[in-house]
Image: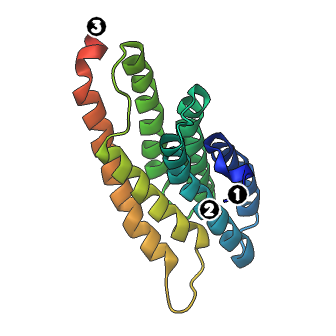
Amino acid sequence: MNKVFSHPNTLTLFRVIAVPIIVILMMFPNRVCTWVAAILFSAAAITDYLDGYIARTRGLVSNLGKVMDPVADKLLVSSAFIMLASLGWVPAWIVCIIIGREIAVTGLRNIIAEHKEDVSASNLGKYKTGFQIAAVIPLLIHYPFWGLNPQAIGNFFLWGALIFTIWSGADYFFKFRKLLKA
């Protein structure tokens, strides 16, 4: 593996840098730009897994990584959804729920961390992220090709993402409700 991309914080930074590029590409919604945006989004999404894996296996876990990794993920996914909504390719109300949940859970995770509790993502949160990524990629592609309708595929995963977004958010707040009362 290239030395530059062997450090988890570099991979996290790649996700942050990918965000404005994807936004700019989606400002020109033609077949080429949407494909490039989808490929860049896919590469950035893969780094989400890789940076955590590299950090754990090589003992490179850092405070910067702990803070920036979830921020980079939320920037990447939220920006893509906002651009998709701005183009009318996804319902804005779904994007509002997804981003609202992300902000609310981030706030809750800060409270959890202050109480020295584990703030690791739950399995439901991991499913939520998986469905969101699986929705965004075909929704970014948008235009039919080889007889496939990426919008239909993306919408299928979008509804799954919405369900897991609500479910995992409710689960977080239910699990840590005692901290909210304190």
User: Which residue is the site of mark 1?
Assistant: 22
Marks 2 and 3, Cα distance to the nearest angstrom? Answer: 41 Å
Give the x, y percent position of residue 165.
36, 46
Q: Answer left or right for 103 relative to 11.
A: left
Secondary structure of the residue carrying tag 3 is loop
Amino acid on which disc 2 is placed: Ala
Give the number of the disc on residue 43: 2
Q: Residue at x 58, y 87 (%)?
A: 145
Amino acid on which disc 3 is placed: Ala
Query: Dots 1 and 3: beta carbons under 8 Å?
Result: no
Q: Is residue 85 visible?
A: no
Q: Residues within 10 Å of mark 2 (few under 14, many from 20)?
A: some
Specify the quadrant that holds the N terminus: bottom right
Q: Answer left or right for 155 relative to 174.
A: right
Q: Residue at x 67, y 63 (%)?
A: 40
Give the number of the disc on residue 182: 3
Q: Residues within 10 Å of mark 3 (few under 14, many from 20)?
A: few
